[in-house]
Image (spheres, rainbow, N blue to C red):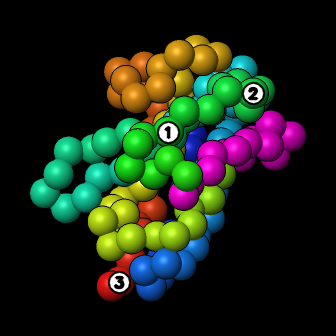
Amino acid sequence: QVQLVESGGGLVQAGGSLRLSCSASGRAFSSYAMGWFRQAPGKEREFVAAISWRGGSTTYADSVKGRFTISRDNAKNTVYLQMNSLKPEDTAVYYCAKDTSRWGGGPKQGAYDYWGQGTQVTVSS
């Protein structure tokens, strides 16, 4: 069993930055890739970024490439999402998720078996 808890969301002006954290319970954290997804009001949940089990590989949605950075600290069982140059269209609930493998799930939501409860990010114009 894995529990994921996101934090770090909030209200920020356009152009600002936020860093989201996702803390995981259980020793299995370091053996799996992790991902961040988001869901805006009235829209489907979409992929944001993913990172491999040791952090050596990452992938991003085109909409956030160059602005967001995913990283992880396996000693702390935590994955991060640094978000810079935020835009109003980044407003959403952000979720972290655990992959079922060390790498490869990427944007495929079916590849993730545990999800956090989400943290709200609101970007004002």
Left or right relative to 51: residue 77: right
Q: Nearer the viewer, residue 10 or 67?
A: 67
**Residue most toward the left?**
42
The disc labelled 2 sits on which kind of residue? Gly
Q: CA distance from mark 2 to mark 3?
A: 34 Å
Magenta residues, as a range? 67-79
Q: Secondary structure at mark 1?
A: strand
Which residue is rendered at x = 30% and y = 65% of the image?
89
Circle nearer the N terminus (2, 3)? 2
Viewport quadrant of the N terminus? top right
The disc labelled 3 sits on which kind of residue? Ser
Can you see residue 28? no
Task: From the image, tell me which residue sits under label 2.
Answer: 56
Task: From the image, tell me which residue sits under label 1.
Answer: 60
Q: How many circles with numbers are drawn on the protein?
A: 3
Vertical position of residue 4 compared to residue 27: above or below = below
Which residue is rendered at x = 79% and y = 43% of the image?
73
Task: From the image, tell me which residue sits under label 3.
Answer: 124
Q: CA distance from mark 1 to mark 2?
A: 14 Å
Can you see residue 124? yes
Q: Nearer the viewer, residue 44 or 119?
A: 44
Task: Kindly report the secondary structure that dominates the magenta region of the rendered protein.
Answer: strand
Which residue is rendered at x = 42% and y = 19% of the image?
111
Q: Nearer the viewer, residue 30 or 85?
A: 85
